[in-house]
């Protein structure tokens, strides 16, 4: 169980740190743009976190998991009562307009699961920014789709010039 929890913890921490960094970057934009970016975070990284937690729970229950909304609901109903309410609230927050509710629910469920949900300090933030920049640069080298190339270039430039990392949908360019 310790090895399993360590595996969940490492994946969870990386994704949570990226979410924290991207949430911080959203504050750089106007309210209208920020609202669209918040919804995008909910559809991408937040959904990835929910799927990660549910997949881990499915492994412990010996149940197969696929990442559709219907399957998430089925899995939630098969969870122990102690986790069911928190996971339902977390899944429900994916359809809201802000990541604030998601973050609150995530911190609660993380405490129940025994995984850490701690804020970024300066050194950790620097290493996460470096990792994201490297990931985007590698993706840019391989990318052939012009709109995605433009999006990656803008994200890298925003990170370089304003020291702000954002995860944005392609239509926001």
Image (tube, helix red, strand yellow):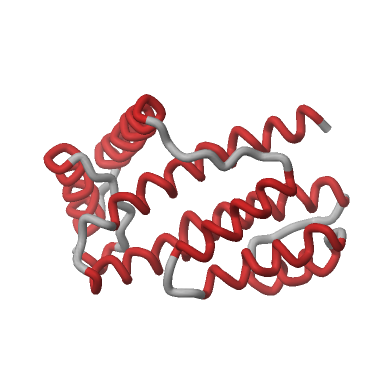
Residue 126's place in the image compared with 113, above or below, is: above
Q: Specify the quadrant that holds the N terminus.
A: top right
Q: Nearer the viewer, residue 74 or 19?
A: 19
Question: What residue is drawn where x is 55% and y is 58%?
Answer: 104
Q: Is residue 157 left or right of residue 86?
A: left
Q: Nearer the viewer, residue 101 or 21?
A: 101
Q: Specify the quadrant that holds the C terminus.
A: bottom left
| Residue 163, image quadrant | top left
Expressed as whole percent of the image width and height from the top left, the position of residue 145 reads 25, 55
Residue 76's place in the image compared with 163, above or below, is: below
Q: Residue furthest left?
A: 161
Residue 53's place in the image compared with 101, above or below, is: above
Question: What residue is drawn where x is 15% and y is 43%?
Answer: 162
Residue 103's place in the image compared with 92, above or below, is: above
Expressed as whole percent of the image width and height from the top left, the position of residue 113 reads 73, 46
Expressed as whole percent of the image width and height from the top left, the position of residue 67 reads 64, 61
Question: What residue is drawn where x is 65% and y is 68%?
Answer: 89
Q: Nearer the viewer, residue 139 or 118?
A: 118
| Residue 88, image quadrant | bottom right
Question: What residue is drawn where x is 53% and y is 62%?
Answer: 102
**Number of marks present in the image shown:** 0
Q: Is residue 95 left or right of residue 132?
A: right
Q: Is residue 44 left or right of residue 32?
A: right
Expressed as whole percent of the image width and height from the top left, the position of residue 61 reads 87, 51
């Amino acid at each position: 169980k310790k090895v399993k929890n360590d595996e969940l913890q490492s994946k969870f921490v990386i994704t949570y740190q990226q979410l924290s960094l991207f949430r911080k970057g959203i504050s750089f934009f106007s309210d209208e743009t920020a609202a669209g970016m918040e919804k995008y975070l909910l559809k991408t990284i937040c959904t990835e976190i929910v799927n990660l937690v549910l997949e881990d729970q499915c492994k412990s229950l010996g149940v197969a998991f696929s990442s559709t909304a219907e399957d998430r609901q089925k899995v939630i109903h098969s969870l122990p009562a102690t986790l069911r309410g928190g996971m339902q609230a977390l899944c429900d927050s994916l359809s809201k307009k802000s990541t604030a509710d998601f973050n609150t629910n995530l911190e609660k469920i993380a405490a129940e699961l025994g995984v850490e949900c701690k804020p970024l300090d300066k050194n950790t933030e620097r290493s996460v920014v470096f990792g994201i920049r490297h990931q985007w640069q590698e993706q840019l080298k391989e990318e052939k789709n012009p709109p995605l190339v433009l999006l990656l270039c803008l994200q890298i430039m925003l990170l370089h010039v304003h020291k702000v990392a954002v995860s944005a949908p392609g239509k926001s360019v």
